[in-house]
Amino acid sequence: MSSVLKIENLCVAVNEKLILKGVNLEVRQGEIHALMGPNGSGKSTLAYALMGHPKYEVVDGRIFIDDTNLAELEPDARARLGLFLAFQYPVTIPGVKVADFLRHAVSNIRNPERKEGEGLIPMRDFRKELKSRMEELGIEQEFARRYLNDGFSGGEKKRMEILQLAMLRPKFAILDETDSGLDSDAVRFVSQSIARLSGPEMAIVIITHHERLLEINKPQQTHVMLAGRIV
């Protein structure tokens, strides 16, 4: 039975200003949804609120994955339940190598009860899987030895987000304007990669202003957001 992400009457405030004013949305594993609308309509606010960013205060409404209410869960717990957010502006972490970051992230998702310093996915297995995913996506192996997003171009940062998506294999992937600021080649990479990774076990919500990512990744549903509501 496929999992369901259900959002009911979600109202969210930022710095005491109400941004989302009653959002309702239901997404099932295996579906592709597009979320569109002008700047300031609340699309990114919805993405951050779903992931549990502390700046975004849920004033009213509920968010569920199946029977689990996400309201009281920290972002890492939401990730372990199968929720993933690809950032519009990914964070840079100097000194942390891509491979080390991914090994810890994958271990935490697959073994939610592990204690820090214990239970990491075996290095041999991890390297084999990482190499396979990078080859599948056409990403050079040297990429894994660089520091996370440090000195990355805009296109490389988005490749990093896609590589995380490929390794973590979430139930629900929220892609927040992954095509923003990219040239045509980078957009083609992102679009084709999403198509390779999508399938019956992963729902994808594509937040975008454009149709470029949707030409290959045809959504079952397209939602338009205006003034904090899906209209």
Image: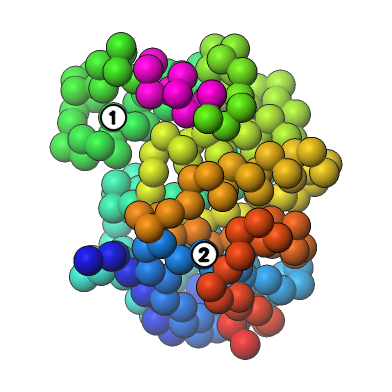
Q: Is residue 127 above or below residue 187?
A: above
Quarter of image, res 177:
bottom right
Q: Decide whether residue 231 is among the magenta residues.
A: no
In depth, the one of 195 and 115 nearer the eye is 195
Colour basis: rainbow
| Count of numbered circles on the image | 2
The N terminus - image quarter:
bottom left
Instruction: Measure how far apart labels 2 and 1 are at the Cα level.
Output: 27 Å
Depicted 92 relative to depicted 162: above or below: above
Query: Is residue 133 one of those drawn in magenta?
Result: yes
**Horizontal side of residue 4 vs 31, given as left or right:** left
- Image coordinates of residue 122 in percent, x first then y, are 25, 16
User: Quick check: can you spot residue 92?
Assistant: no
| Mark 1: few/some/many CA within 10 Å (<14, 14-19, 20+) | some
Query: What is the quadrant of the C terminus in the image?
Result: bottom right
Residue 80 place in picture, x, y as percent = 29, 47
Secondary structure beneath label 1:
helix
Q: Is residue 180 left or right of residue 3?
A: right
Disc 2, SS:
strand
Residue placed under numbered mark 1 in the picture:
107
The x and y percentages for residue 107 are 28, 29
Mark 2 residue type? Ile
Q: Amino acid at mark 1?
A: Ser
Q: Nearer the viewer, residue 142 or 200?
A: 200
Residue 43 appears in the rendering: yes
Magenta-drawn segment: 127-135
Residue drawn 30% across the image and 12% down it: 124
Report the residue marked by disc 2: 32
The residue under the point 68% across, 39% down is 189
Picture quadrant of residue 103:
top left
Residue 172, compared with residue 151, is above or below; it is: below
